[in-house]
Image (spheres, rainbow, N blue to C red):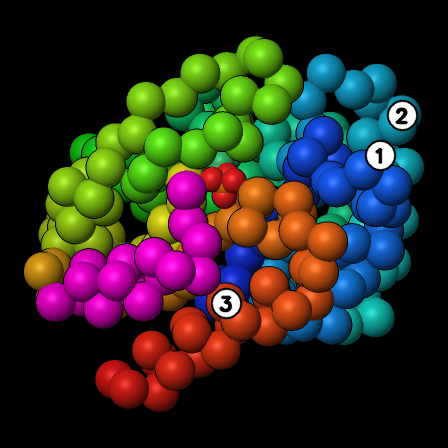
């Protein structure tokens, strides 16, 4: 059976930007204690064996908190680890191929930066879309492999408003430059302007780069919970 996921506070890992001396698993566990609701292991330029090991150990930590784990980009790593799902971008394995390989019992997320990409992702079998980068972010460049121009709040609103178009029912998270200080504006502003609410926010640096990931995660979780309670 397909797992369910609460996308409220979606942590994407980034070992490269951990504060000096902060252990990856310690930071992950503290983030879970603070209340992140989904975790995605994102690794670039790493040996496949090491990726599998990190994913497996991350899954053990997430399992303790009953939090679903996604693997970024790599279907082979997902198949080895068998966690909740896979997340792919527009230049990774096409979403329809990923869906065929992972089956219907796994969750699939797709990064999009336009309404057309979002509608296609849903047709291809995506359970949720990650919309962004909403604001400029340093984190996408940490591996020096990818550069990213923010698609902005306009693209975000377009995607949100397209829900319901052509049968496209999707869960949505925003990503890119999201911090506690701009999250209330993002959540309330986007529902005000599009009529559709985000299901959550996806975050790297606001949590991972912090020496107090538990407190940061709790703060973000409080903001998203309050937003959902207000609706
Ligand atoms: N995809 C779009 S923006 C981004 C990814 C992986 C990075 C988000 O990182 P941060 O630090 O939360 O801005
Ligand atoms: Mg990718």
Dominant SS in magenta: helix
Circles 2 and 3 in contact, beta carbons < 8 Å: no
Label 2 and label 3: CA atoms lie apart by 33 Å
Query: Residue under circle 2?
Result: 49
The residue shown at (45%, 54%) is 179
**Furthest residue in direction top, as rendered:** 145
Which of the image's four quarters has the C terminus?
A: bottom left
The residue shown at (65%, 44%) is 209
Is 191 one of the magenta-colored residues? yes
Q: Where does residue 150 sit, x and y in percent of width and height?
A: 30, 29
The residue shown at (74%, 72%) is 33
Secondary structure under the numbered disc 1 in the rendered image? helix
Which of the image's four quarters has the N terminus?
A: bottom right
Circles 2 and 1 in contact, beta carbons < 8 Å: yes
Label 2 and label 1: CA atoms lie apart by 5 Å
Q: Check the image and report above or below for 106 versus 74.
A: below
Mark 2 vs mark 3, foreground winner is 3
Q: For mark 1, does the 10 Å Cα neighbourhood hold few (<14), some (14 to 19), or many (20 or more) residues?
A: many
């Amino acid at each position: 059976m397909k797992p369910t996921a609460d996308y409220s506070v979606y942590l994407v890992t980034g070992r490269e930007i951990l504060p000096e001396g902060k252990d990856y698993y310690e930071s992950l566990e503290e983030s879970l204690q603070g209340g992140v609701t989904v975790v995605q292991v994102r690794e670039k330029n790493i040996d496949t064996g090491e990726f599998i090991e990190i994913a497996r150990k991350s899954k053990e930590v997430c399992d303790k908190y009953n939090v679903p784990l996604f693997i970024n980009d790599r279907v082979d790593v997902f198949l080895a680890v068998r966690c909740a799902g896979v997340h792919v971008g527009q230049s990774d394995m096409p979403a329809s191929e990923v869906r065929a390989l992972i089956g219907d019992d796994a969750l699939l997320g797709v990064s999009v930066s336009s309404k057309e990409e979002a509608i296609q992702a849903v047709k291809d079998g995506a359970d949720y879309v990650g919309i962004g980068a909403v604001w400029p972010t340093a984190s996408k460049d940490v591996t020096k492999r990818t550069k990213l121009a923010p698609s902005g709040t306009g693209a975000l609103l377009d995607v949100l408003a397209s829900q319901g178009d052509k049968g496209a029912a999707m869960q949505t998270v925003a990503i890119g430059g999201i911090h506690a200080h701009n999250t209330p504006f993002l959540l309330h502003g986007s529902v005000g302007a599009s009529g559709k609410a985000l299901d959550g926010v996806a975050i790297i640096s606001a949590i991972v780069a912090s020496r107090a990931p538990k407190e940061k995660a709790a703060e973000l979780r409080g903001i998203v919970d309050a937003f959902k309670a207000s609706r």
